Amino acid sequence: MRKNLYFYIKAVFSASPEDIEHLCLLQKRMGSAYARLEIPAHLIAYGFFIIKRQITSLFLADKSDQFDTSSVIIYIGSMMDFSFKFVMRAYDSRFRKAVESKEVLRMVSLGQDLAFERETQVRTFFAWSTQTLTLLCENRAQEIQLVEDSDFGLWFTHKGRNMFKGTREFDTIQKEIEKIDSDIALVQNTGEVPKKFSEKVYRSIRKINFLAENSFHQIEKVESGKDPLTKVLNRRFLDAVMQNEISYSMTKEKKFCIILFDIDHFKSINDKYGHLVGDDVLCFVANTLVALLRVNDYIFRYGGEEFLIILTEMTPQEAQKCAERLRASMEKKPLLLSSGETISVTLSGGLTFFDGKTNAKVLINQADQALYKAKRQGRNRIITSVPSDGTTVVIGEPDLP
């Protein structure tokens, strides 16, 4: 590591204008490597700070008057900032792709029965494969249907694309289908079957079948990241999403906020109506919040009756209005039970925002402390914690006893 660091610093500070393209590429490679190793963004930023401080201190300690100290310090700062900018840009891009590859948002939006979908498409592709191999055995190759025209092909084009796009399996399946259809079209047009055509088709069938199964398996692993009751995300992806938003905020200078909501008097609801009604309340709250949030926001079931919301690219002022809108909407919308009774559900919330200095755990702790104050001060309200000075703001009306 020390040797690599030496060559990196040497490359940065010995670069000439002609080396700028190579230098940018070097920073991007570093950023991608950091993201691949899942090194937290705040550690990368701290590492750059340490390097800048150490190099600067060496020149400040030099008493030979060989250098214009002010110019040297400015040069050191500008080169390190230049490097950090390109490193974090590549880091952000790589990290976002890693998060997106897990299909968190897509699986939330699709909400379909994956087991049924998988069984159906395995069956349709098997039907096409059986028919194709039968026609080949009967020397009726010209009657073979193109994969893209089969039930499986139509599903893959219109629905499988949405589920699998962005994965390595999707690109390979698509290329394999195009290759098979190209060969089939040639047979249909010429009436001649090339040598080893049957063998090629059989290999492609096996390959597509394997890749499709693997794709469904990957998506099912993502599906396990959803809370089975409320269908919102559970805490499995919280760290990755939080780190992703911190990285994006640092590189793009976009603020984001988090709200930690807690259902007021939830234990009393369970005690009075039973746990089945309690489950209905949890689903009711989750569905209400999801309906009011933007597609680029995240909602997690954080605890028993707690929900954590990440409001991306939103200022504290906008987040305060959003949090209050969510609280007020819940207060005005009673839950109708199957018995005909209605339950009024209210929320207490703690709001905070990322200011470039906090990490994920500190940020969540600030929201939790603000939530605690909201509960202590009467419930059915939002308290905003401002990380920079620790002040709090109360929004909403108190819950009358």
Image (cartoon, rainbow, N blue to C red):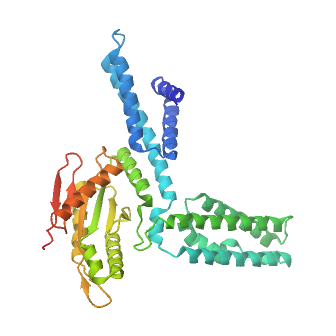
Q: Is residue 239 above or below residue 82?
A: below
Viewed as shown, does residue 110 lie left or right of 376? Answer: right
At a point 34% along the width and 74% down the height, the residue shown is 282
Q: Is residue 289 visible?
A: yes
Q: Is residue 170 above or below residue 53?
A: below
Residue 97 picture location, percent across and down:
49, 53
Q: Is residue 319 visible?
A: no
Viewed as shown, does residue 19 lie left or right of 301? Answer: right
Viewed as shown, does residue 331 lie left or right of 87? Answer: left
- Front residue of 101 and 57: 57
Q: Is residue 21 above or below residue 279?
A: above
Name, please, the residue furthest toward the front. 271
At a point 45% along the width and 39% down the height, the residue shown is 87
Residue 27 picture location, percent across and down:
48, 36
Residue 114 picture location, percent across and down:
55, 73
Total marks placed: 0
- Front residue of 188 and 51: 51
State which quarter of the image contains the C terminus.
bottom left
Quadrant of res 229: bottom left
Quadrant of res 283: bottom left
Residue 127 picture location, percent across and down:
71, 79
Viewed as shown, does residue 114 lie left or right of 239? Answer: right
At a point 30% along the width and 50% down the height, the residue shown is 354
Name, please, the residue furthest toward the top. 64
Quadrant of res 135: bottom right
At a point 19% along the width and 66% down the height, the residue shown is 381
